[in-house]
Image (cartoon, rainbow, N blue to C red):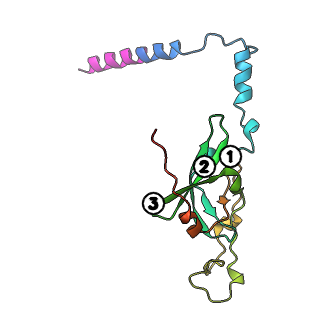
Amino acid sequence: MLVKSIIAGVAGSALLATVAIAQTPTDKGDKMSPAASTTTSTTSATSYQGNWRASKVAGLSVYNDNNESVGSINDLLMDKGGSIKAVVIGVGGFLGVGEHLVAVPFDKVKFVSEPIAYTGASNTGGNAGGTAKTPPTTTGAAPAAAAAKPNPWYPDHAVYNASKDELKAMPEFKYATE
């Protein structure tokens, strides 16, 4: 029985080795080929520095000019040329249930790399729940987000100048099925 297992192991290793040998490139010495030079220049991470990852933009929190949270980005809509034309913002709801989707023009949304800095010390009115213009105060250290370093690959949040009620009053965006 042990002999059969050893033979099966050797045969399997031989099969895997032939697959690995078949995948090695045959043109190792030609470093000046056009294919080799274009691949290295287009995949350099520094050539894309300053660009944002679209996968990280979807899901960003959206605030208005008064630092009130009004929703989050659900999607980015672009034309066939690849230019982003609209931002789909989800307003209200809980975990996507009961959420009202609205599409707003991309040029009306401002992206901010710096986190929102809440200053609890300036709020001396004993505001336990917070109002529309002042967030609730907390005891202890300052929020960790205020000291966080901005990420170069995506913004911290987006700003759209409308209240939650104004966004909910806008026509609902629905994805066309045709």
**Quadrant hosting residue 33:** top right
Distance of label 2 from label 1 (alpha carbons): 8 Å
Q: Nearer the viewer, mark 2 or mark 3?
A: 3
- The spot of residue 169 in percent (x, y) is 54, 65
Q: Is residue 12 magenta?
A: yes
User: Image check: 35 left or right of 176?
Assistant: right
Residue that label 3 marks: 95
**Residue drawn 44% across and 18% down?**
16
Q: Are marks 2 and 1 in contact (CB under 8 Å)?
A: yes
- Could you say which disc has been placed on residue 56 in the image? 2
Q: Position of residue 34 (x, y in %)?
A: 73, 15
Please state the horizontal and vertical placement of residue 17, each as a whole percent of the image: 47, 16
In the picture, the quarter occupied by the N terminus is top left
Q: CA distance from mark 1 to mark 3?
A: 25 Å
User: Quick one: 15 or 87, which is closer to the camera?
Assistant: 87
Residue 36, picture quadrant: top right
Q: Could you say whether the residue bearing mark 1 is in a helix, strand or loop?
A: loop
Q: Look at label 3 and name its amino acid.
A: Leu
In this picture, which residue range is highlighted in magenta?
1-14
